[in-house]
Image: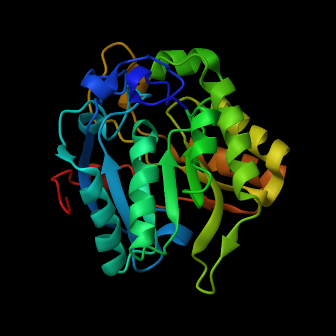
Amino acid sequence: MENKNGCTMCPRKCGADRANGHRGYCGADNKIYCARAALHYWEEPCISGKSGSGTVFFCGCPLRCVYCQNYDIANMQRGKSISLERLSEIFLNLQEKGALNINLVTPTHYSLDIIEAVGKARKRGLTIPIVYNCSGYENTETLKALEETVDIYLTDIKYMDPMLAKKYSNAEDYPYIAKKALAEMVRQQGKAVFDSSGIMQKGVIVRHLLLPTQLENAKAVVEHIYKNYGNSVYISLMNQYTPVRKFTDITELNSKVSEKEYAALVDHAISLGVENGFIQEGDTAEESFIPNFDGKGL
């Protein structure tokens, strides 16, 4: 992983001279931009527990899916610039508030800063796990650099179909990249470790957000994970897709996922033998589940 002078932190490898203020594909330059830092209660039970996950939402994104529910911060339309020292302080503040972990959302393009900020915070008493909450579109070189920093990978795998990845995320290579990235994450973390309260301290959770009409892609994702990693990796199947804007050209994304589609995906996972997993119940596809990116905690 190179520095910000010719950025190759993400698989786009756009080469932007971020160190001198140029913005990369992700939208970020040489500063750290965040939209919110607060306790978050809507992650998987082993991440949020009852006390909450200390979630830091970063701005910008190397992937920028067309259906992103955090569209405004992914596209740098909101957010505040903070110093590396302040980021380190935020980690400690969240720990003081009772956070069970530090949950870094869309962290890829700030990996160098995160390594340094976590190191500073640990010297000042940070002891809770670091969760790397990402899209799955990750360079293995960047992940290797994070090995001594990250305790838990909370990663998406969005696509097994390259054409779907191109259509929705302008990333035809996503399946290839995500498979390699997951292999590296599992190599680092091995078997999951939990504390006496059932809160994960080490491990890998793979999320898949079921998209409308894309059941076959979702089944292929689950099959890849289970075939290669069995129950050593936790699978989180999500039905919370929310149409946050009106599409004129990709009309299938204007609908929520049907109960029938989601039930079929869950049944497929069970039929494969998946035991370590999470499912969502009820109507989670509501905008009220999207955090208010108001700069809280920054």
Instruction: Name which quarter of the figure residue 273 lies in.
Output: bottom right
Residue 217 location, quadrant: top right
Q: Position of residue 268 (x, y in %)?
A: 74, 46
Seen as rendered, the residue at the extreme bottom is 196
Left or right of 178? Residue 78 is: left
Q: Is residue 27 visible?
A: no
Q: How many marks?
A: 0
Q: Residue at x 40, y 79 (%)?
A: 51
Horizontally, residue 152 falls left or right of residue 170, namely: right
Judged left or right of residue 21, residue 282 is right
Tell me residue 176's x, y (percent).
68, 24
Question: Quadrant of the image for the C terminus?
Answer: bottom left
Residue sitting at x 24%, y 25%: 21
Residue at 19% x, 43% y is 79
Picture coordinates of residue 55 (x, y %)? 36, 60
**Residue 292 in view (yes/no):** yes
Above/below status of 255 relative to 119? above
Camera-side residue of 113 and 42: 113
Nearest the viewer among 244 and 227 is 227
Position of 164 relative to 139 (above/below): above
Horizontal and vertical percent position of residue 69? 33, 40
| Residue at 52%, 70% in the rendered image | 45
Q: Quadrant of the N terminus?
A: top right
Image vertical order of residue 236 relative to residue 260, above or below: below
The way the protein has been coloured in the rendering is rainbow
Q: Within the image, what quadrant is residue 236 found in?
A: bottom right
